[in-house]
Amino acid sequence: MAPPRATSSDRLEDPATDPVAVAADAAAIIADRTGIAEYPIAVTLGSGWGRTAEQLGDTVAEIPASELPGFSASGVPGHVGSVRSVRLADGRAVLVLGARTHLYENRGVRAVVHGVRVAAALGARTMVLTNGAGGIDPEWAPGTPVLIRDHINLTGTSPLEGPQFVDLTDLYSARLRAIARSVQPGLDEGVYVQFRGPQYETWAEVAMARTIGGTIVGMSTALEAIAARAAGLDVLGFSLITNHAAGVQSEPLAHDDVLQAGRAAEPVLAALLAKVITAL
């Protein structure tokens, strides 16, 4: 029997490897293949946000994530699995990360936050994180975009290794949220609760999240936001409410329904996020 095929993220799992160095290697390849050395803005596109790159500006290059050190092809339906270079009308370059690794894929926390570290290595100062998530607030119908005001990390882990005592006060920048609301007044805000997944949350877990202050539940973003702050980036977070969380609705949850809600909302979300990013 042939051994399992190694992925480009395997190097990150070696404890002797410096994850920042792997990110620098990937950044150097992106800079070389796109001809752009610095990206002041980076965005990770979650479920429902995938068409944003098309409305941002001109695509300079698109690179399959599996061709870059530390990345792997996406194993999750709804994620495009590539890294794209986009030029805004004002000349600024945006790094669009469509290759998100989730903690439940068991590739390690370093792989989960690798895209953020690559963005930092390319000079990013602003990190925009998006996701598709469950809404605890019954007023948020599927298709509603919500700004992330804060998060609760229930994964039991952190992307920080060793004594890195990073201040997470105003982790999700109030300044950037104000810019987003200037583009679309009336945007609601919520507290994102990251569970490990891949199973959806039980009604009791959702009730717990609500009790401790959560209004959104999902399986990404919080760990990436921590890594972004540790790297000195300002963070803007957006959740697309793809479904009511367990206990808020009586119907069973299904990933196909989540994807369908994301597809239905994509045109509006893409236009919104493109306008926000342009305004940053």
Image (tube, grey):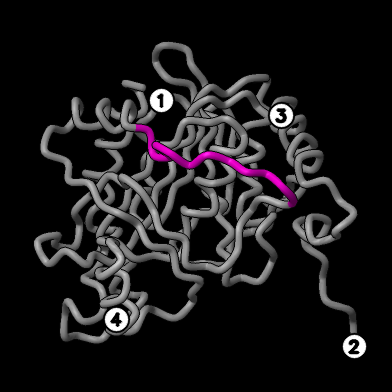
Q: Nearer the viewer, mark 4 or mark 3?
A: 4
What amino acid type is highlighted by mark number 2? Met
Q: CA distance from mark 1 to mark 4?
A: 35 Å
Mark 1 closeness class: few <14, some 14–19, many ≥20 residues within 10 Å: many
Q: Quick one: label 2 or label 4, which is nearer the N terminus?
A: 2
What amino acid type is highlighted by mark number 1? Gly
Indicate the secondary structure of the residue bearing disc 4: loop
Do the numbered discs 2 and 4 sit on residues whose CB atoms are within 8 Å? no
Numbered mark located on residue 1 in the image: 2
Q: Quick one: label 1 or label 4, which is nearer the N terminus?
A: 1
Q: Quick one: label 2 or label 1, which is nearer the N terminus?
A: 2
Residue 170 magenta: yes
Q: CA distance from mark 3 to mark 1?
A: 18 Å
Residue at x-position 35% and y-position 57%: 192
Numbered mark located on residue 253 in the image: 4
Mark 3 closeness class: few <14, some 14–19, many ≥20 residues within 10 Å: some
Do the numbered discs 4 and 3 sit on residues whose CB atoms are within 8 Å? no
The image shows residue 104 at horizontal and vertical percentages of 57, 72
Q: CA distance from mark 3 to mark 2?
A: 37 Å
Q: Which residues are magenta?
A: 162-173
Numbered mark located on residue 33 in the image: 3
**Vertical arrangement, residue 257 with respect to residue 98, above or below:** below
Q: Quick one: label 4 or label 3, which is nearer the N terminus?
A: 3
Numbered mark located on residue 57 in the image: 1
The image shows residue 84 at horizontal and vertical percentages of 55, 37
Residue at x-position 39% and y-position 15%: 89
Indicate the secondary structure of the residue bearing disc 1: loop
